Image: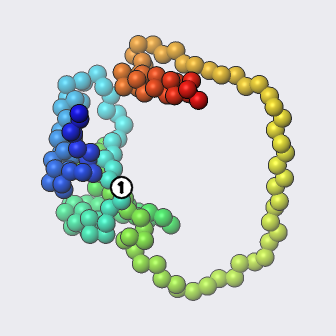
């Protein structure tokens, strides 16, 4: 029986320790494999942050970039030129929406789209043969075999 806790089942302290260990493991892996290119930038992304979390980030960061659109709010903390930590939240968690006026939207005709039925037809089915370098991980093979077995039972 596997008694390993899921990340969301961990305490805040355990989650933090797990995340820091993962970041350190990534750094160690890149150091041990100089053949792996680092020409691109890397982002560590944290989703669904509270307003308080974002305030803590903004206060702790030496520099922070802020971005907001209709649905999300993001703080980006750059670490040098190529590494960034990004902290996302839903905009309504961080900002207060307020009515500041109205505008007149002119009337317009809506385009009606008529869809035609697609007749029965034959489509090609593809499989992928990958070289050993791109072979699926053992867990992927097990999952695929389970899916195929389930499909045969249907």
19 up-or-down from 54: above or below: above
Q: Quadrant of the C terminus?
A: top right
- What residue does disc 1 label? 47
Image point 32% across, 61% down: which residue?
Answer: 49
| Camera sees residue 58 | no
* Image coords of residue 19 (percent x, y): 21, 46
The part of the image, by quadrant, that contains residue 101 is: bottom right
Residue 151, percent across and down?
56, 27
Pick out the residue farthest to the bottom. 101
Residue name at image x 34 percent, y 33 percent: 39
Residue 119 can be seen in this image: yes
> Relative to 66, is 23 on the left or the right?
left
Location of the N terminus (image quadrant): top left
Q: Where residue 108 appears, x then y in whole percent?
A: 80, 72
User: At 42% across and 78% down in the image, what residue appears?
Assistant: 96
Identify the image quadrant of residue 117.
Answer: top right
- Residue at image position (18%, 54%) is 11
Q: Secondary structure at mark 1?
A: loop
Q: Dot 1 surroundings within 10 Å: few (below 14), some, or many (20 or more)?
A: few
Q: Is residue 15 left or right of residue 47?
A: left
Q: Judge whether 131 appears above or below 30 on screen.
A: above
């Amino acid at each position: 029986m596997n008694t390993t806790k899921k990340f969301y089942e961990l305490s805040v302290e355990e989650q933090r320790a797990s995340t820091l260990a993962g970041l350190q493991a990534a750094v160690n892996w890149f150091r041990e494999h100089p053949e792996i290119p680092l020409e691109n930038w890397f982002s560590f992304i944290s989703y669904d942050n509270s307003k308080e979390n974002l305030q803590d980030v903004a206060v702790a960061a030496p520099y922070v970039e802020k971005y907001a659109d209709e649905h999300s709010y993001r703080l980006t903390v750059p670490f040098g030129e190529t590494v960034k930590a990004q902290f996302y939240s839903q905009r309504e968690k961080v900002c207060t929406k307020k009515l500041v006026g109205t505008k007149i939207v002119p009337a317009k005709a809506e385009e009606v789209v008529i869809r035609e039925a697609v007749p029965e037809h034959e489509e090609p089915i593809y499989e992928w043969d990958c070289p050993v370098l791109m072979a699926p991980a053992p867990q992927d093979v097990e999952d695929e075999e389970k899916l195929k077995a389930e499909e045969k039972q249907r």
